[in-house]
Amino acid sequence: ASNDWRARIDSAVAVARRSDVAILVAVIEEGEFRDRAFLSLPGHQEELIERIAATGKRAVVVLVGGSAITMSRWLDRVHGVIDAWYPGEVGGRAVADVLFGDYNPAGRLPISFPMSEGQLPSYYNHKPTGRGDDYLDLTGQPLFPFGFGLSFTSFEYANLSIEPTSVRCTVRNTGMRAGDEVVQLYLRDVLASVARPVQELKGFARVHLAPGEEGEVAFPITPDDLRMLDRDMRWVVEPGVFRVMVGGSSKDIRLRGELVVR
């Protein structure tokens, strides 16, 4: 029945109290002509997460859906979040492999997840605003930025090298487990004849490294990476300085430099 949600949550809490770990699968409703005015989890799923978290048991939330979800109400109360998107018929096995540590995940967000609907639209490659990005009552930073994603190990970036036709760096696995890092290259045209984005993704590379292993990542730079539409809607490459940023997400920039086009 639709009105027995309290009893069903009570039952889930009782099960969680007898368990070592609580895994909560939360879903959203969306589709054609099914736009969401609020990006929080629908129904009473947030109450369920809060009640389970209050038991003190380790709790992991698995999200199923194809768009952004706000989590500020409960994110700090759980021990982990996995966004499974729409994983398909054998998605359960893939999620289980991650939950049990049999697979080290390396997925990255293709969109920004806002803290609140009031931040929308929220995207990483916006034009300069000419003002601060914050609100009177909320930060302007997203909950999770474009390109974000964690794994069971950590990585260190070093040795940025910028040449006319390539950008190179080294990445070292500084953790205890083998894993993949998704190295991302962003550029910014510092001064142009028309407004340009604060950063643009121009390349990414997924590199697998054993613990302690170091690898080199190289991104080719072509005129297509530097071109823009001018005020007459013509593709041009304007001379000037391009800021080079390499890191693990649009907000996790580890290495910075400059490329000068003459």
Image: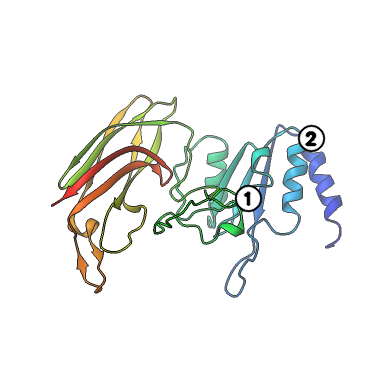
Give the label on residue 166, or none: none
Q: For residue 43, what is the image quadrant? A: bottom right
Disc 1 on helix, strand or loop? loop
Picture residue at 51% right of the left edge, 35% below the top: 102
When the figure is inspected, residue 37 is found, relative to residue 145, above or below; the finding is below
Q: Position of residue 2 (x, y in %)?
A: 83, 63
Instruction: For the N terminus, give its image quadrant.
Output: bottom right
Q: What's the distance in space between the residues labelled 1 and 2, CA to CA?
A: 37 Å
Crowd band around label 1 with a 10 angstrom C-alpha radius: few (<14), some (14–19), many (20+): few
Picture residue at 25% right of the left edge, 73% below the top: 233
Q: Amino acid at mark 2?
A: Arg
Q: How is the image coloured?
A: rainbow
Disc 2 on helix, strand or loop? helix
When the figure is inspected, residue 229 is found, relative to residue 18, above or below; the finding is below
Q: Position of residue 234 (x, y in %)?
A: 22, 71
In the visual, does 128 lie left or right of 170?
A: right
Q: Earlier in the sequence, mark 1 or mark 2?
A: 2
Q: Amino acid at mark 1?
A: Asp
Picture residue at 82% right of the left edge, 51% below the top: 8
The residue labelled by disc 2 is: 17
Number of marks in the rendered image: 2
Q: For residue 32, what is the image quadrant? A: bottom right
When the figure is inspected, residue 37 is found, relative to residue 72, above or below; the finding is below
Q: Position of residue 18 (x, y in %)?
A: 78, 33
Marks 1 and 2: CB-CB under 8 Å? no
Crowd band around label 2 with a 10 angstrom C-alpha radius: few (<14), some (14–19), many (20+): some
Q: Nearer the viewer, residue 166 or 231?
A: 231
Q: Position of residue 35 (x, y in %)?
A: 61, 69
Residue extending farthest left: 262
Q: For residue 224, what is the image quadrant? A: bottom left
Q: Nearer the viewer, residue 183 or 104?
A: 183
Give the label on residue 137, or none: 1
